[in-house]
Amino acid sequence: MDEPPKPQLPQELEYIQYQHSLEAQYLPAIRTLISKDLSEPYSIYVYRYFLCQWGHLCYMARLKPLDASLTGVIISKLEPHHAHSTPTIRGYIAMLAVASTHRGHGIATRLVRMAIDAMAARGADEIVLETEETNVPAMRLYERLGFVRRRADKEEN
């Protein structure tokens, strides 16, 4: 059975890298977008922890004409990881959200690829993430992008 075609986005999308100079303009929109989708509430300090240190690994999607609203956001980090016998540089996708009205248009895929490319360019040996097992669309997205499922209780750190 064929699925009905998805409606086109009403406007053109722009993808931008987070910059500290954009905090006042976009941090409220980032928090709003993520809080709608993620199961855990985060304080402003969690957002600042990631964005102040790894803003260069965080990307936003917004519709043109430009305003302070966001269609999608990904927040990532990259740091040494010492759980292996040889330390690695581990990328971590901490948060990904796309407005429910704009899902199904490849926005999440593009944001994840942008974050992966940025982490790889900075020497990431591996990239990990966590998602709820019940979030089937996210699981499909990550598996399609090459991530392998591993239970969190089996993780060595």
Image: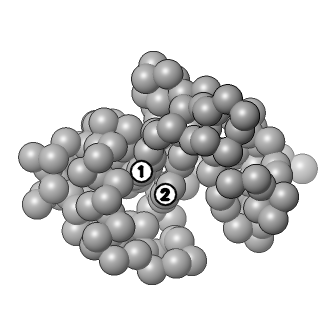
Q: Which mark is residue 95?
A: 2
Q: CB of mark 1 within 8 Å of CB of mark 2?
A: yes
* Vertical order, 66 against 153 (above or below): above
Q: Nearer the viewer, residue 96 or 83?
A: 83
In percent of width and height, residue 54 lies at 33, 43
Q: Secondary structure at mark 1?
A: strand
The disc at residue 24 is: none
| Alpha carbon separation for disc pair 1 and 2 | 5 Å
Residue at 42%, 67% in the rendered image: 34
Q: Is residue 10 visible?
A: no
Give the class, few, some or many, for how many residues have Cα within 10 Å of label 1's Cα (few <14, many ≥20): many
Residue 124 x %, y %: 54, 28
N-terminal of the pair, mark 1 or mark 2, is: 1
Quarter of the image for residue 49 reads bottom left
The residue furthest right is 1
Image quarter (top left, top right, bottom left or bottom right) of the C terminus: bottom right
Classify residue 150 as left or right of residue 70: right
Q: Residue at x 65, y 58 (%)?
A: 130
**Left-right relation of 9 to 3:** left
Residue 121 appears anywhere in the view: yes
Q: Which mark is residue 75?
A: 1
Q: Position of residue 121 (x, y in %)?
A: 45, 19
Residue 28 image-quadrant placement? bottom left
Name the side, left or right, on which 41 lies relative to 116.
Answer: left
Relative side of 54 to 74, left or right: left
Residue in the image at 67% along x and 45% along y:
83
At label 1, which amino acid type do we have?
A: Ile
Q: Nearer the viewer, residue 32 or 23?
A: 23
Callout 2: SS: strand
